[in-house]
Image (spheres, helix red, strand yellow):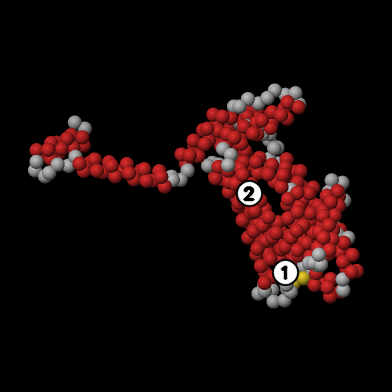
Amino acid sequence: MQLLLLTAETVTSKPFFYENWFFVKPFIWLFSQCMNGIMFVLDKVGIYNIALCIVLFTILTKILLLPMTIKQQKSMRIQSIIQPELTALQKKYAGKTDTVSQQKMLEEQRAIQEKYGVSMFSGCLPTLIQMPILFALYPVIYRMEQYVSYLGTLESKLSADQYTRMWQLFDLNLKDAPNKASGFPFTWAILIPVLVALTQYLSTKLMSSRQSNRNSNANDNPMGNSMKIMNIVMPLMLGFMAISFPAFLGLYWLVQSLVMMVQQIIINKSLDKKSTEELIKENIEKANKKRARKGQPPISDKAGISTRNIERYNAMNAKPSEQAMEEKEAKMKAATEYYQSRTAAPGSLAAKANMVRDYNERNKK
């Protein structure tokens, strides 16, 4: 989404190419009204600060998008659970490019996804639903003076000096880019692009870490490897863009990443309380309700055995716990003591008998 900003000039009067799309305009109006409401409330309490407005606006929009975020995270968790089976299927048909083999692979892939109550597009659907909303956010932030009418009210109400200070963040005007700050990059303004890149990386890392931990075959998944690269490249690109774009946009990205991190921690804790089988059972029940409305037969719980196999495999490949290490050390100690107890006094009849036994064991006699 941020790459769309590359199509816009740094002059805020130039519109985005998609602003008049019929499915974007209603959200632009909604978010502009949200920003108007925030400025109205702050005006009533005597606070005139655009940076605070952006912070509150970002938190509000992320709360509004929270149901979609939760749905997306659940879908990603289910996709990570079934990924080992999909990877095995890809290996099964590796090198088979004929039409019949490709058709069979797609049929088996659909069967695996249906078994877990998901579809080929279930992971993309929440993102597609969010796209018009994300498209609408940037014009409201990037061209605030056009869409937020209450700014005109404040401009007429406040003195020129007060209105100018309203746009200030320390000594930087939020309409200016950080690289326009005096003494850049040896000034505090460099923190905006640096923190934008850092928080964006941490938020994406936090989002993908649970999926990677649950999927032990992630390294065999080309899509997973591509995502790892993108999780590094995108934060760097965003930080680079924040250098030359207006500072209020960088502030928005920074606060958005921080809110996403908090939301992700809460969502991860909530999902981690549920076992793999519980997540799949809930997903199948939800899918069956949709199928019932369409008059389709319900999905049977075919995922149980596969789920147990995945959990058993993950448990075998998990790092040993301290308790397991202690038990292993205790067994090694007991074995050593047992071996030492078999060693008799030198020169005794028992020692000679042990020597004969050991010689026979070594030579398999």
Where the C terminus falls, by quadrant? Answer: top left
Residue nearest the viewer, comparing 144 with 65:
65
Instruction: Check disc 2 and report its element: helix, strand or loop.
Output: helix
Q: Mark 1: few, some, or many residues within 10 Å (few <14, many ≥20)?
A: many
Residue that badge 2 annotates = 266
Residue nearest the viewer, comparing 240 with 290:
290
Q: Residue at x 61, y 42 (%)?
A: 271
The location of residue 354, given as percent across then percent down, is 15, 37
The location of residue 257, given as percent across then percent down, is 68, 56
Q: Is residue 77 left or right of residue 141?
A: left
Q: Is residue 58 visible?
A: yes
Q: Quadrant of residue 52?
A: bottom right
Q: Earlier in the sequence, mark 1 or mark 2?
A: 1
Which amino acid type corresponds to the residue marked 2 in the rendered image?
A: Ile
Q: Quadrant of residue 298?
A: top right
Q: Nearer the viewer, mark 1 or mark 2?
A: 2
Q: Residue at x 75, y 46 (%)?
A: 130
Which amino acid type corresponds to the residue marked 1 in the rendered image?
A: Pro
Q: Residue at x 68, y 35 (%)?
A: 120
Query: Tag on residue 289?
Result: none
Q: Which residue is at the far front?
A: 45
Residue nearest the viewer, comparing 32 with 41:
41
Residue that badge 1 annotates = 178
Q: Residue at x 86, y 50 (%)?
A: 25
Residue nearest the viewer, comparing 111 with 225:
111
Instruction: Check disc 1 and report its element: helix, strand or loop.
Output: helix
